Amino acid sequence: MKVEIERKPKSVSWVDSRLETSRAVAVAVATVGLLFALHSPSARAAGEVQADAPPCAMCHGMLGEGSAYGVPRLAGQNADYLSHALSMFKAGTRASAVMQPIAHSLSDTEISQLAGYFSKQNAPLVDAAAPKSSQLVLAGKQLAETGAGKVAACFSCHGAQGTGNGARFPSIAGQPAQFVINRLHQFQARAVGITPQPGTMTAVSTTLNEKQIEEVAAYLSQLER
């Protein structure tokens, strides 16, 4: 007699976990491709690769331009900041299910090379052609330059025109609008049930309402470095 065994469907959490793992592997492959390019004879010079090399292109784009779906822009980012961020992912002091395993596989030299490569790229803005209300952009410009009420000006920490300031304050100029929105929401989520340390982005995010978040995101996404 043949006995049929009922197989239970996989849970949603199991599926999500598998998708997350697959994405991490895909990004890792892209990163390894870049590292091979960095060490290959075709590299133009130390820390540089040819334009057709795959610099973590699976998520961040061929030149690190990011995407309109919320992937951050790495092109032109401060090298010190990128090195610091990757080192934090590697040490586990900055959380990301995707980036932590990738960073953990990198040597300090490779982290420095990746940071140097992306800091030298000049990619087009992914949101440049996206329609944005001029009123929205102008309001965001004011928030970024001078702030409003309890809201601190973005450029007071992130440098003139949002070009970044050392290892702590990244460049925010040209970041995709959806990434800015998502990131500020993440900071706001961190602030729930705690008193954020003054001066941190977690604290700053609590002073922003949803309309202001959309305004500053619209402005920064159009801002050339």
Image: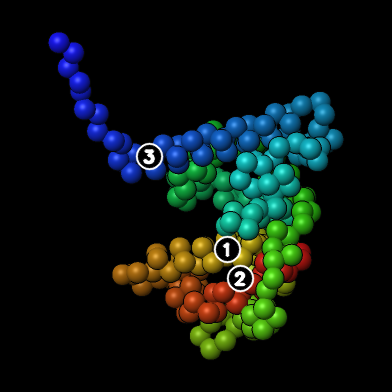
Q: Are marks 2 and 1 in contact (CB under 8 Å)?
A: yes
Q: Amino acid at mark 3?
A: Val
Q: Residue at x 52, y 62 (%)?
A: 183
Q: Percent from the top left, x then y, of residue 16?
A: 39, 43
**Identity of the residue drawn at 20% across and 21% down:** 4
Which of disc 1 and disc 3 is earlier in sequence?
3
Image position of 155 (left or right of 50): left
Dot 3: element: helix
Counting from the top left corner in percent of width and height, residue 86 is at 57, 46
Identify the residue under disc 3: 15
N-term mark: 2 or 1: 1
Crowding at dot 2, Cα within 10 Å, few <14 / some 14-19 / many 20+, comes out as many
Q: Which mark is residue 217?
A: 2
| Nearer-N-terminus badge (3/2) | 3
User: What residue type is disc 1 on?
Assistant: Gln
Residue 207 appears at what percent x and percent y?
47, 79
The three-letter amino acid code for the residue at tag 2 is Ala
Q: Is residue 162 visible?
A: no
C-alpha distance separating marks 3 and 1: 25 Å
